[in-house]
Image (tube, rainbow, N blue to C red):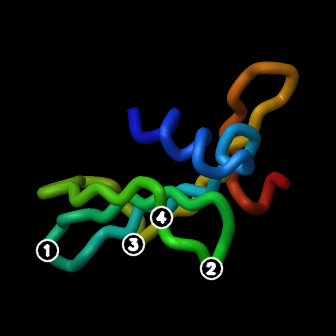
Amino acid sequence: RPMAAAAAADERVGSMSFWKLTVSDDRSGLLEARADSGVPPFISQQIPWTDFPLPSVDVWVGRDDGTWVLLLPSEY
């Protein structure tokens, strides 16, 4: 339960978090989630292989009336 532990340690995680998937040239990936820019990730997961077509993508995750909403930075 990394998300619950992160929310207990940092109240910002319970309302908003910032996720990034970065794809390497060898098609491996790194998924990281942060409470804010400039802070260490509370989730960092290596992905051995992905066919995700972009070199990276940022997704912002926020709560709206108790529902989690995914946003691209350009939608905020």
Q: Could you say which disc has been placed on residue 41 in the image?
A: 4
Which is more foreground, mark 1 or mark 2?
Answer: 2
| Numbered tag placed on residue 38 in the rendering | 2
Q: Is residue 50 left or right of residue 68?
A: left
Tell me which numbered mark, 3 or 2, is placed earlier along the sequence: 2
User: Secondary structure under badge 1?
Assistant: loop
Q: Earlier in the sequence, mark 3 or mark 1?
A: 1
Query: Residue at (64%, 58%) from the top-left corner?
Result: 35
Name the secondary structure under disc 4: loop
Q: Report the Cα–Cα distance between label 3 and label 1.
A: 11 Å
Q: Residue furthest top?
A: 66
Q: Please say if the residues under marks 1 and 2 sit with CB atoms less than 8 Å apart.
A: no
Residue annotated with mark 1:
26
Between residue 14 and residue 56, name the one nearer to us. 14
Look at discs 3 and 2 and give the one toward the viewer: 2
Q: Point out the frontmost of discs 4 and 1.
A: 4
Residue 26 percent across, percent down from the top left: 13, 74
> Alpha carbon of mark 3 to alpha carbon of mark 2: how far?
21 Å
Which residue is pictured at 21% across the width and 55% down the height?
A: 47
Q: Amino acid at mark 3?
A: Pro
- Label 1: few (<14), some (14–19) or many (≥20) C-alpha neighbours in 10 Å: few
Query: How many angstroms separate mark 4 from mark 1 (CA)?
Result: 23 Å
Reading the chain from its start, which is encountered first: label 4 or label 1?
1
Between the residue at mark 1 and the residue at mark 2, the CA separation in whole angstroms equals 27 Å
Identify the mark at residue 55; answer none if there is no mark. Answer: 3
Which of the 4 image quadrants contains residue 22? bottom left
Q: Is residue 26 left or right of residue 71?
A: left
Please state which of residues 69 and 5 is positioned toward the viewer in this rendering: 5
- What is the quadrant of the N terminus in the image? top left
